[in-house]
């Protein structure tokens, strides 16, 4: 299998994450509008192949009936898209709750995984979905509480993830844990690796690498003891550190997000203090998207990766509504696939 076989997906959740009714927030963008914006992208006749998306309101009711879910699938496939990876609603305020919380909280987390598996089954049997994973994280925002007892708290997350993985395996699904500095126990490359190895179920639970978030891993945000780079680093130092990180996490990587990062640690709403995605052609972008992607995509086929997805989380609505945004993104995706 060559890189040319990789399908190119666009994420739907940038229309939701960081959006809302609170002061300073912009309103969500509907699933239909996000689909139309994605379908409009075109680079020399090449289009997005599919979409990845978040299984929660207002895009999707996780308790929707089978017929309602099939109607959503028809809307997606009717635009020429496949459905790939799904994001389980594991966070407090959605269906789930903290994976390192009380027994009740952890039960809600597992309920969210069950809901995601049920929806995946409907899409799979419909024929709209033939590949992809279900994404999770610890749903424990921030690392302060985790630091009160790191060993015990990581152990609780491990046990929750093991049970979630067993649920996924029963449904023929795989879970990918998102590496992002805001999630307790997953906030550094080392803690993420410890968690994956603690679960020890690579056939069912792996890593979801995002270029923007894993860049911050190298800088040691929220975990300076594991920083691989210091401010003012050279290009040579960067790629040496990047190779060190990817060599550790790539064997676990089963889902991959193409993205750009400008080095800021800022989001919006409940997703503040996290890695900031920026446009693919942002002059302040810190990453050579194509080159960095290749570190993660070595031997991708052996890990069952069949698509890659763009993540533009926290883009302003004006950026999301600009058709040229999506052409630039699609061109970056094509460069990654075809390099």
Image (cartoon, helix red, strand yellow):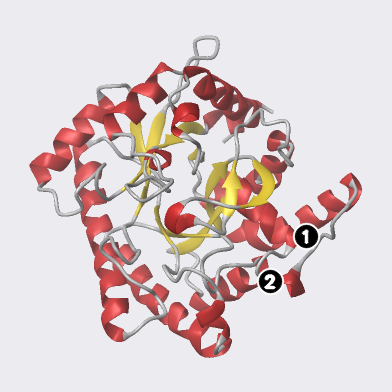
Quarter assignment of residue 102: bottom left
Front residue of 49/278: it is 278
Quadrant into which the C terminus falls: top right
Q: Is residue 143 left or right of residue 336?
A: left
Tag 1's secondary structure? helix
- Number of callouts: 2
- Disc with the residue nearer the chain's start (2 vs 1): 2
Quarter assignment of residue 75: top left
Position of residue 329 measured from the top left corner of the image (x, y, whole percent): 56, 27
Q: Is residue 58 left or right of residue 143?
A: left
Position of residue 298 measured from the top left corner of the image (x, y, whole percent): 67, 45
Position of residue 16 measured from the top left corner of the image (x, y, whole percent): 36, 44
Tell me if label 2 and label 1 are in contact, CB under 8 Å: no
Front residue of 51/313: it is 313
How crowded is the residue under tag 1: few (<14 C-alpha within 10 Å), some, or many (20+)?
A: few
Mark 2 and mark 1: Cα distance apart in space: 16 Å
Front residue of 292/254: it is 292
What's the residue at 47%, 27% (across, down)? 318
Task: Name the outermost residue toward the front.
Answer: 23
Asked whether residue 314 appears in the rendered view, the answer is yes
In the image, residue 209 sits, relative to residue 48, either above or below, namely below
Position of residue 56 measured from the top left corner of the image (x, y, whole percent): 27, 50
Label placed on residue 282: none
What's the residue at 43%, 24% (across, down)? 321
Asked whether residue 81 appears in the rendered view, the answer is no
What's the residue at 54%, 46% (across, down)? 256
In the image, residue 266 sits, relative to residue 104, either above or below, namely above
Tag 2's secondary structure? loop
Residue under pointer 1:
244
Label placed on residue 223: 2
């Amino acid at each position: 299998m060559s890189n040319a076989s990789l399908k190119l997906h666009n994420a739907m959740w940038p229309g939701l994450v960081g959006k809302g009714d609170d002061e300073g927030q912009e309103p969500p963008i509907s699933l239909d509008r996000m689909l139309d914006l994605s379908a409009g992208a075109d680079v020399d006749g090449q289009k997005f192949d599919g979409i990845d998306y978040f299984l929660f309101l207002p895009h999707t009711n996780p308790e929707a009936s089978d017929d309602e879910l099939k109607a959503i699938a028809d809307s997606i496939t009717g635009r020429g898209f496949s459905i790939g990876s799904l994001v389980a609603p594991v966070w407090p305020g959605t269906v789930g709750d903290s994976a390192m919380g009380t027994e009740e909280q952890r039960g809600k987390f597992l309920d969210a995984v069950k809901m995601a598996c049920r929806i995946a089954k409907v899409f799979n049997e419909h024929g709209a979905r033939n590949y992809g994973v279900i994404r999770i994280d610890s749903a424990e925002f921030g690392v302060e509480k985790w630091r009160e007892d790191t060993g015990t708290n990581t152990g609780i997350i491990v046990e929750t993830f093991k049970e979630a993985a067993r649920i996924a395996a029963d449904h023929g699904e795989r879970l990918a844990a998102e590496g992002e500095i805001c999630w307790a126990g997953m906030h550094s490359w080392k803690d993420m690796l410890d968690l994956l190895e603690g679960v020890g179920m690579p056939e069912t639970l792996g890593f979801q690498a995002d270029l923007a978030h894993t860049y911050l891993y190298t800088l040691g945000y929220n975990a300076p003891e594991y920083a691989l780079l210091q401010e003012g680093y050279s290009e040579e130092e960067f790629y040496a550190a990047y190779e060190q990180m990817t060599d550790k996490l790539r064997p676990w990587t089963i889902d991959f997000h193409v993205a750009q990062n400008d080095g800021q640690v800022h989001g919006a709403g409940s997703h503040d203090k996290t890695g900031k995605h920026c446009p693919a052609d942002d002059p302040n972008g810190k990453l050579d998207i194509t080159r960095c992607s290749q570190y993660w995509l070595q031997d991708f086929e052996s890990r069952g990766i069949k698509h890659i997805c763009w993540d533009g989380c926290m883009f302003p609505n004006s950026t999301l509504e600009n058709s040229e945004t999506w052409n630039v993104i699609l061109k970056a995706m094509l460069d990654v696939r075809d390099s």
